[in-house]
Structure formats: structure tokens, C-alpha cells
Image (cartoon, helix red, strand yellow):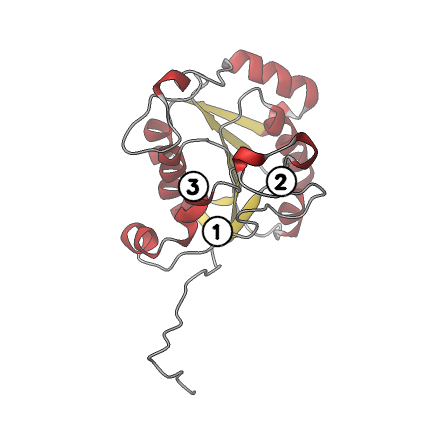
Amino acid sequence: MAVKLLEVSHETEGVVVECGCFLGGSTANLSLVRDIVGRRLITYDSFEGLPAPKGNDKYARPEQTGFLRADLETVQSNVRRYGAIDRVTFRKGWFEDTLPRHAEPVVLAFIDVDYQSSLDECVRNLWPHLTERGYVFIDEYVLTDYWALFWSERYWHENFNTTPPGLLGAGTGIGVGQYYLGPVSEWHAPQDPTSVAYTRKDFSGYWNYDADVPPRVT
């Protein structure tokens, strides 16, 4: 994420957005990078833990409601100690209530929200605000049915009237030193992956091959 932010032109207006911060570890790190590139970080979180399940979300469980809770004061204290808190704006509340009011252009969004319904809310509300070459990073890159959203032609057609952008690092994460072998149920500590996957506003993961239609020569 730091590398991609350093590649963004200073002439491109936009903020960095974080959705889901828990204790503020990623917030502190992101705030330091934002300090270097001179951008503001907006952090969205309920500060009440995970929401109650809704819809047909495979990863949401009633017993997880409130899990990963950290109050705003604790997060601010951690960021003040380890990061650059002057660069951070905290917006407290459930995504369904706060994200529809987002108005700033976004050069990079980091989404670490656990639930499929939460990912959907983040993408639907933030994607329209991404700059032309704005990035979206996610943490749940090994969960095939979770990140499949970024390859769904129906989802992108219905919500944005465009083709899906795809996701670099889907399934394995971008190479940052650790690796992943096998499904989640077979994880072992030495191979526990620590990475992210990402896409960009102008990317396309659209499968337009049709064996019955000859290629058009131009």
C-alpha cells in the first residue's frame, strides 16, 4: 500500500480510506505513510465490533456480534503513540450509516471488514469516489467466495454498469515474504499468510473470450 501511494501523483486530489481498524495497528502504519505523501486518512469503524449478521452472509455468525471490539479512545491512544494522529479523521458508526455520506475523492481504500455484507457496503459506497487510477486493497484474499465479488460480472453490471476489475493476489496475496498453501482448514503457523490483494479503478478482469465468435480484426 505504501508503494502504491508513493506512485500516486501529488497532483491527484484524494484521501486514503480505511474500513475496519480494530485496535488501530494498520491505522498507525497508514497514518505514517499518509504523513509522508501529504494525504489525509479517514478511518471508518463502528468501534463496537462486528455487526449482527444479515442477509445470506456466509461468514457472519450471531455469536460473533461485538467481536473485535475496540473503543474509539483506545484506538486513538494507539495511533497517537505509534502513528501520526494529526493525519487521521475517525468516523464512527456502522458502514451502512456512515459510508453513504462519504464525499471525498479516494486514491486508496484498505478494506478489512470480515463479513461479505460489509465488503459489499464498502465497495458499493466507495468505488464511485475512487480516482481514475485509485486502488482498493483487501485483507481477506484467501477466501475464494469472499473476493469473488471482484470477478462477478453481474455484481459490477448491476451496481456500476461496468465490467469487473479483477483482484491481483486473489487466493494467495501479493508476494511480501510469506506464503499460503492449501485451504484455510489446513493452515499451519509457518505458512500462515500475511499479505493483501488489490485492484484498481481502471483494471478489468472481464472474461470476454467466446469460442464460437471469431476475433474481430481492426
Residues under numbered marks 2 and 3 in contact, where contact means CB atoms less than 8 Å apart: no
Q: Give residue 195's mark.
A: 2
Is disc 2 surrounded by few (<14), some (14 to 19) or many (20+) residues within 10 Å?
A: many
SS for dot 1? strand
- Distance from disc 2 to disc 3, alpha carbons, whole Å, reads 16 Å
Q: Quadrant of the N terminus?
A: top right
Residue farthest toward the bottom in the current orientation of the protein: 217
| Residue receiving disc 1 | 131
| Residue receiving disc 3 | 146
SS for dot 2? loop
- Distance from disc 2 to disc 1, alpha carbons, whole Å, reads 24 Å
Which amino acid type is marked by label 1? Thr
Of the numbered discs 2 and 3, the one sitting upstream in the chain is 3
Q: Residue 43: where, in percent of width, then height?
A: 50, 29
Q: Residue at x 50, y 13 (%)?
A: 71
Tell me the mark number nearer the camera, choosing from 1 and 3.
3
Residue farthest toward the right in the current orientation of the protein: 177
